[in-house]
Amino acid sequence: MSDRPSDVSVADGFGDVAWVPMSDSRRLLPATALQALNALHELAAAPDAHVYVHCMVGRLRSPTILWLYLIALGLDPHTARDLIESRAPHATAGHYQMVSNEHVRLAQKHGLAHFLPHPRSDLVVPFPLAEEE
């Protein structure tokens, strides 16, 4: 999720890598949002898959795409945001610079039509938060 190809590759031990070009300094085009959601869904729907979503800094693009995907799977936007931001405090899921309510409705409609029922009911299993020392 960046404006240049990923530094992550299959050679790094990843089974598959999908790159969706996007900027964090302007509104996400609906077609780009759908491309990212579909790529994420294809990876996440594979049996036993563990999906790593990243961008250059991890503050806007990847949290926003993950947020939209969780919404597409039926999570409430606030719940999805809390899930992401509680585990990545510097992330801003659904940043106003990138998305609007139109993107939320697009994710909900697209997810209902194409992602549900999800082939992996165990997909969203949040890892436990590290205990503070």
Image (tube, rainbow, N blue to C red):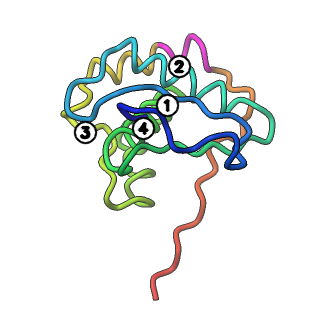
Q: CA distance from mark 3 to mark 2?
A: 20 Å
Percent of width and height locating residue 13: 72, 48
Percent of width and height locating residue 9: 62, 41
Residue in view at x 36 percent, y 18 percent: 105
Q: Are marks 1 and 2 in contact (CB under 8 Å)?
A: yes
What residue is disc 3 on?
95
Amino acid found under the numbered disc labelled 3: His
**Quick one: quadrant of the N terminus?**
top left
Query: Which of the 4 image quadrants contains residue 11?
Result: top right
Q: Is residue 108 left or right of residue 112?
A: left
Query: Which of the 4 image quadrants contains residue 68?
Result: top left
What residue is disc 1 on?
69
Percent of width and height locating residue 22: 35, 27
Element under label 1? Answer: helix
Q: CA distance from mark 1 to mark 2?
A: 8 Å
What residue is disc 4 on?
67
Q: Residue furthest bottom?
A: 133
Residues in magenta, as a range: 110-115
Mark toward the start of the polypeptide (3 vs 1): 1
Query: Which of the 4 image quadrants contains residue 44?
Result: top right
Q: Are marks 2 and 4 in contact (CB under 8 Å)?
A: no
The answer to which of 105 and 19 lies nearer the viewer is 19
Q: CA distance from mark 2 to mark 4?
A: 12 Å
Percent of width and height locating residue 46: 75, 31
Q: Are marks 4 and 1 in contact (CB under 8 Å)?
A: yes
The answer to which of 125 and 89 lies nearer the viewer is 89
Amino acid found under the numbered disc labelled 4: Trp
Amino acid found under the numbered disc labelled 2: Gly
Residue in view at x 56 percent, y 10 percent: 113
Q: Give neighbour class at mark 3: few <14, some 14-19, many 20+ (Cα, 10 Å).
A: some
